[in-house]
Image (cartoon, helix red, strand yellow):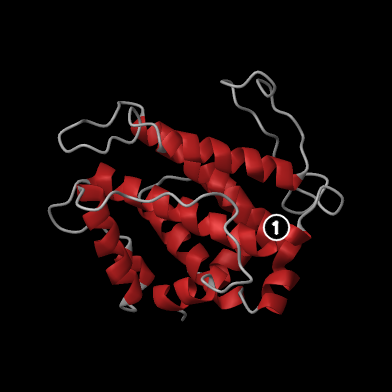
Amino acid sequence: MAGRYGFAQFFSRDKVKTFKPKKKFEQGTLKFNLHKQANASLSSGIDLKEVVRLPPQEDLNDWIAVHVVDFFNRINLLYGTICEYCTEETCTTMSGGPRYEYQWCDTDSVKYKRPTALPAPKYISLLMDWVESQINDENIFPVKVGVPFPKNYLQVVKKLLTRLYRVFVHVYIHHFDTLVALGAEAHVNTCYKHFYYFVVEYSLVDKKELEPLREMTEKMCL
């Protein structure tokens, strides 16, 4: 199984671009230290089911926050590897095969207050901008020690991770051949397994949202 080092090494190649700017933790903060701890565990080759478990005496909300940011960065890189093959002409809808189509809705926006069908690259661009705005909002993801998380924190996290999961769905179902051709399959599989084990461990994505990749997941993760 490819480890974190292999994943990072692959996605540091010149041919791979970041789809959106990478989110970083400030050095010396609690979340920076947790981020280093999580990545060290991932690099060590420990079973991914063990990697996602909350370290002793750590705060669950902080642990989840670190992973949300990490998953945003990694899915950002993942989509960056294939985004030139995902165009408004080739992917006219944000879908996961004929049975699943996702429509964009952001009640805070002027244009998308109601679910709107969009081409996949437009949907994913809006999604990444929206996720970035959420994780940069210190009212949702506080960065200072002692500042509490909001009461709706887990509700927000579930929405973020559910929408990020849809990028996996689209990429695996519509761009798998491209992943294979780029030699990225094993690395993306590692990223997916880490994400899957994490959201299942903390019940952060509803089972019905995981359905599009159920058969693949059963072979890969169960």
Relative height, residue 105 to residue 43 (above, below)? above
For residue 34, which quarter of the picture?
bottom left
Relative height, residue 178 to residue 99 (above, below)? below
Q: Is residue 171 left or right of residue 148?
A: right
Report the amino acid beneath label 1.
Answer: Cys
Q: Residue at x 47, y 79 (%)?
A: 2
Q: Is residue 3 visible?
A: no
Disc 1 target residue? 83
**Residue reaching furthest right?**
89
Q: Nearer the viewer, residue 208 or 157?
A: 157
- Secondary structure state at the residue bearing disc 1: helix
Q: Residue at x 28, y 70 (%)?
A: 40
Q: Nearer the viewer, residue 218 or 139?
A: 139
For residue 49, which quarter of the picture?
bottom left
Q: Residue at x 29, y 62 (%)?
A: 38
Residue 112 screen position, x and y as percent: 68, 24
